Image (spheres, grey):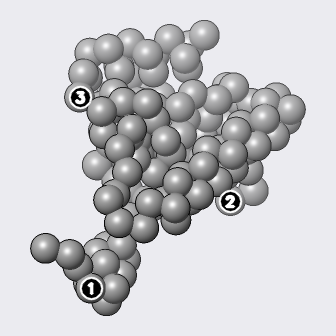
Amino acid sequence: MQETAEQRSRIMRCVKSKDTKPELVVRKISHSLGYRHRLYRKDLPGKPDLVYPSRKKIIFVHGCFWHGHKCKRGDRLPKSNREYWVKKIKSNMERDKLHIEELNNQGWSVLIVWECEVKNLQVLTQKIAEFIDG
C-alpha cells in the first residue's frame, strides 16, 4: 500500500535528528570509558553530535540511509520518488564531506560512527577508545 503525501509527511516529521538510538549508544560508551563530551556545538561546522574540546576530537553519528553508507541498510532507496532521494542523499554526503574538511582545517580530528556499527558494541567501544586516546 502506498502512503498519501500527508501520511508520508507525518512519518518524516517523526524522524529525529537529535538523541537517536545509535547516538545514545555512542554517548553511553563514551561516558563509560570515562570521556566527557559536549553535544551539538552550533559554533562548529555540521553541529557535531559529540565534541571533546580539550582533545580536539569530534564524533558524528550518521544514519546509514540518510548519509549514503554502503551497507545493507544504507545502500537502498525508496521505490517511489527515487530522483528526490538520490539528490537528497547525495547532497547530504557532499555537505558531510565539506563539514569534515572545514573541521580538519580548524585542527579537529573527526570520527564517523555509522548506525550499522552500533550492532557490535565491543568493536565500537574499541574504535571510540582508540580514536579519543589516539
Q: Nearer the viewer, residue 1 or 101?
A: 1
- Amino acid type assigned to the residue bearing label 3 in the image: Lys
Please identify, in this view, whether the residue under mark 2 or under mark 1 is nearer the observer. 1
- Amino acid type assigned to the residue bearing label 2 in the image: Lys
Q: Pointer 2 and pointer 1: residues touching (CB < 8 Å)?
A: no
Which residue corresponds to mark 2?
42
Which residue corresponds to mark 1?
4
Q: Nearer the viewer, residue 41 or 120?
A: 120
- Amino acid type assigned to the residue bearing label 1 in the image: Thr
Up-down relation of residue 40 to residue 107 (above or below): below
Q: Pointer 1 and pointer 3: residues touching (CB < 8 Å)?
A: no
For disc 2, the neighbor class at 10 Å (few under 14, some 14 to 19, many from 20) is: few
Q: Where does the image place residue 36, in percent across and percent down from the top left?
A: 50, 35
**Element type where label 2 sits in the image:** loop
Which residue corresponds to mark 3?
119
Q: Nearer the viewer, residue 105 or 79?
A: 79
Q: CA distance from mark 1 to mark 3?
A: 33 Å
Q: Where does the image place residue 38, in percent across and percent down from the top left?
A: 56, 46
Q: Where does the image place residue 133, in percent across and percent down from the top left?
A: 56, 13
For disc 1, the neighbor class at 10 Å (few under 14, some 14 to 19, many from 20) is: few
**Residue 128 location, quadrant:** top left
